[in-house]
Amino acid sequence: MSDASKGLSLYNTLTRAKDDFVPIDPLNVRMYVCGPTVYDFAHIGNARPVIVFDVLFRLLRHLYGGSHVTYVRNITDVDDKINARALRDFGDEISSGKLSLNEAIRRVTEKTADQYHKDVATLGCLEPTVEPRATEFVEPRADGKADMITLIERLIERGHAYVAAGEVLFDTASMPDYGQLSKRNLDEQQAGVRIAVDAHKKNPGDFVLWKLSSPEEPGWDSPWGRGRPGWHIECSAMSAAYLGEVFDIHGGGLDLIFPHHENEIAQSRCAHGTDVMANIWMHNGFLQVEGQKMSKSLGNFYSIHELLETETFGGRKWPGEVLRLAMLMTHYREPIDFSVRKLEEAENTLRKWKRAADLAPEVAPQLPAEVVEALSDDLATYAAFQRLTQLAGEALDAGGGDNAAAASLKAALAFLGFDVGAAKVDEAAIARAIARRLELIAAKNWAEADRIRDELLAQGVQLKDGKDPVTGERITTWEVRR
C-alpha cells in the first residue's frame, strides 16, 4: 500500500468545508457514484462526473493500492420511459412468458448501455470495480445482498414509511434532521406554504418508495402489490449491497443534491440506523454550452457519441482525450462553459505535452510528487496541469537522451488517463490553420497570422512559406520538429 498519509482533502457538501479524508478501512476504500439512466445516449453533461470521479478513482488507487479501492457506479434501468418502451416493444413476449420483465428491459437498454461504455472508454475512463443494474436489486436476492423491497419493509417496520393510495411513501417528519445535505428546512415545506401536497401525503416533502403498476405497466410483485420502485431507493440498495451501510465517498452532479441524494441519505440512515450514509459527499458543477444552458430547444444538446463521431460541434469530430482534458481544465466544483474554443485550447495543450513526452527514455518513470499533491488538494487539476506544462517545457529544452522531465511527464499523462503513445499529427487541423493564416496574410493582419505560426511551432509544427513555381502565389508547407 502506498503512503496514504500525504494529506488528501476533499470538499464535503455535507459539511460545506474541505475535509481531511480518513477512510473507514484503509484496506477497503469505498466510493459510490450515480451512473446513467440508459434510455438515451449519454450527453456531455453526463460526461463530466464520469471523468471527475475517474480521476479520483485513479488517485485513491495510487494512494491506497489498486486492490484496496472499490468503486461502484450503477446503471439505472428502472425508469418509466424504459418500462413503457419495454412494454411497447416486447409486450406480447412478456405476456406469453417468453420474456421476463428484466429480459425485456435489458433488451431495451442494451444498445444505450453498450454505447455508454464505449463512450466513457474513449474518454479515457477506467471501468468501475462494480457496475450494478437497478433491475437486479428490486427483489430479495439469493446471495443476500441488499435489495429495494427489503429496505422498504424495514423503513415501514421502523416507522419511517407508510402505505397510502397504493404507494409506499417515506415519512420525512420521522427524521428530525432531514435536509442536512441540501440545508433545506423541513418546517419551510409545510402544506399550503410553498409546496402543493398530494391528498394522500402526510407531509409535502414525503417521497415515493414504491408505486403500483397498472396491468399495462411492467412491475414486480411486492407486499404492497405489483409495482415498481421510486428513483431514490435504487441507489440506497445498490450502494449497501457492495459498500455496506456506511462508506467513504458518494459522488454525483450538483443537480442530484436535492432531491436524489438527500432522499438517499434519509432512506439509508433510517433503514440501517446509522448517523451517516457516506462520510464525504462530492458534487461536480454544472455545464453550459457556448455560454448557454444546454437544451434541445436551443439546439445545443450534444451526446458524447455525437462529439466523438460526427461533425456537429465546431464542424469536426473531437478525440476523446481532448474532451477529457477540456472537462478537467476547470476545477470540478466550478461551472464549466463547454465551447469550441476550450476544446481547441485543450487540443493544443495536449499536443505540446505529448510532443514533450515523446522524448522520454525507455525507463520506469516516477509520478511527479507535485501532481499527486495538487490532486490531493480537492482534485486541483489546474495546479497539476501547470506542473505538466512546466515539465513539457523542461523536456523540450533538454531534447533527447536522459530526459527526466519527459519521463515524469509521460508518467503523469498515463496516470491522468491520457494516451502516451507517440504524438499524432492532425493534418486536417494543420491544413485549416494554414488556410486561415493565408487569409489573414491576404488581409494584411500580420499579428494574427504570426500568432497562428507561433502556435503551430509550439506544437512542433514548423511552417515554411514560399511561392508556387508556376503561378507565383504564396504557398505554405510544414514539417514536424521533434
Image (spheres, grey):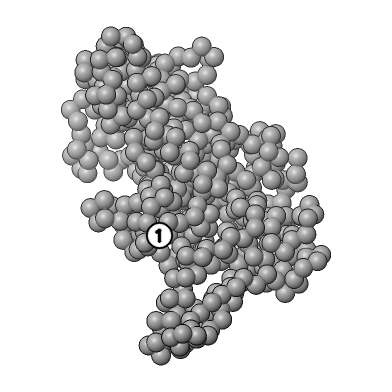
Q: In the picture provided, is 40 more to the left or to the right than 23?
A: left
Which quadrant is home to the N terminus? top right
Position of 158 compared to 373: left or right?
left
Name the residue rendered at 64%, 36% in the picture: 69
Along the horizontal axis of the image, is 70 left or right of 474? right
Dot 1 crowding, Cα within 10 Å, few <14, some 14–19, many 20+ = some
Residue 357, given in percent of the width and then of the height, sits at 68, 62
At which x and y percent is residue 39? Answer: 34, 35
Q: Amino acid at mark 1?
A: Arg
Instruction: Pick whichever, 86 or 465, lies toward us.
Output: 465
Q: Residue furthest right?
A: 402
State the SS at label 1: loop
Q: Nearer the viewer, residue 34 or 415?
A: 415
**x, y percent for residue 264:** 42, 33
Q: Nearer the viewer, residue 172 or 429?
A: 429
On the image, numbered disc 1 is attached to which residue?
316
Task: Residue 430: tell me if it is visible.
Answer: yes
**Residue shown at 39%/33% (left/top)?**
111
The residue that appears at 52% across and 24% down in the rendered structure is: 241
Instruction: Please tell me whether residue 22 is drawn above or below residue 289 in the rendered image.
Output: above
Residue at the image position 46 percent from the left and 85 percent from the top: 470
Is residue 324 in view from this perspective?
A: no
Q: Is residue 390 above or below residue 238?
A: below
Position of the C terminus by quadrant: bottom right
* Image height of 303 relative to 450, above or below: above
Q: Is residue 147 left or right of residue 164?
A: right
Could you tell me how many numbered marks the image carries?
1
**Quarter-wise, where is residue 356 in the image?**
bottom right
Extreme residue in the front direction: 470
Residue 463 point in image, percent of width and height: 56, 78
